[in-house]
Amino acid sequence: MARMTNAEALELIKNCSLSKLGEMALKRKRELHPKKITSFVVDRNINYTNVCWVDCDFCAFYRHAKDDDAYVLTFEQIGEKIDELIAIGGTQILFQGGVHPKLKIEWYEDLVEWISTNYPTITIHGFSAIEIDYIAKISKISYTEVLQRLQAKGLFSIPGAGAEILSDRVRDIIAPKKLDVKNWLDVHRQAHHVGIKSTATMMFGTVETDEEIIEHWEHIRNLQDETGGFRAYIMWSYQPDNTKLAKDNPEITKQSSNRYLRLLAVSRLYLDNFQNIQSSWVTQGSYVGQLALLFGANDLGSTMMEENVVAAAGAVNRMNQEEMIRLISDIDEIPAKRDTAYNMLEIFEKESV
């Protein structure tokens, strides 16, 4: 099968009908996942701190260290959250925070070791590229050393957060203090080289063009060709409520479900070396999240026992395991609970609907 070009992707985004895109993306998904198994993971997003110096205009979650509601969770508080996750059958924590200006590699090593020692059944999927980048800078060590030292303590994989749009023009506008495209890619490259797999993400709907969305896809497709280290691709729409970016740019509005599904479908066709694509029900709501499964997504993502970053920007959607099983069954697919590495832990009977 010939690889989709950037020009072909652009033509589809701009001119193809939504129904045709869905048909094409579902066909490709069925080729990759012929057993019609749609997976999800039971996890919790633990934001260990909301203190951040990066000041992204699109973020409503961060605080400065002197703010009254700034926090760094104690290990005991983190443990309480993990206990609650284990009680509902959870297997993974998505562990990330703001970029705290004073926390060095030793603090992170102690934290990861403490979790691994006290909760050996829990997989740590944590620390985005911007966190790894800053830990390296403040600790005066390389990306590789940060990753290897955290891996030695129990870090299993890293999330794709902080990618936003992998275009330096866009990043200079919405997050000028964040690491550039080259360094975001290099953190993931080095992670893959030491045996830590990761996810690739995209947040669309700020100031990017269609061409820059495709530029983003090209970057991650090329790195996947090089390393094979991405487990999945996840995209979501910018949530404008309570953010400085939306206040300063009133022309930026919430993205439509049509736009989300259109881009999702083209990503399934363009990213031919990605096995797994997640639906973003957290930003889209459960029913558009379900519809995404007919537009190329094969994974419903996380039950997200706790989510604070997107919620701070006004999108508060919740789902439990039973609801996920029902939504997957409702489109005649087979629900399965997975782990971080996409191993299926439990395959459920389709519910009668």
Image (cartoon, rainbow, N blue to C red):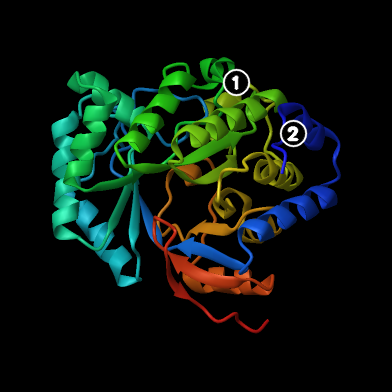
Decide: marks 2, 1 in contact (CB < 8 A)? no
Instruction: Say which quarter of the image contains residue 102.
Output: top left
Instruction: Say which quarter of the image contains residue 14.
Output: top right
Q: Quadrant of the N terminus?
A: top right
At x 26%, y 28%, the residue is 144
Locate residue 35, reporting x and y percent: 61, 69
At x 22%, y 36%, the residue is 148
Q: Which residue is nearer to you in this view: 61 or 352?
A: 352
Residue hosting label 2: 9
Report if residue 209 is visible in the image. no
Query: In this picture, is 28 found above or below 331?
Result: above
Locate residue 94, reporting x and y percent: 36, 49
* Residue 300: image tag: none
Which residue is at the far front?
A: 1
Q: Quadrant of the C terminus?
A: bottom right
Q: Nearer the viewer's eye, disc 2 or disc 1? A: 2
Query: In this picture, is 339 found above or below 96?
Result: below
Residue hosting label 1: 248
Report if residue 325 is visible in the image. yes
The answer to whether residue 242 is left or right of residue 3 is left
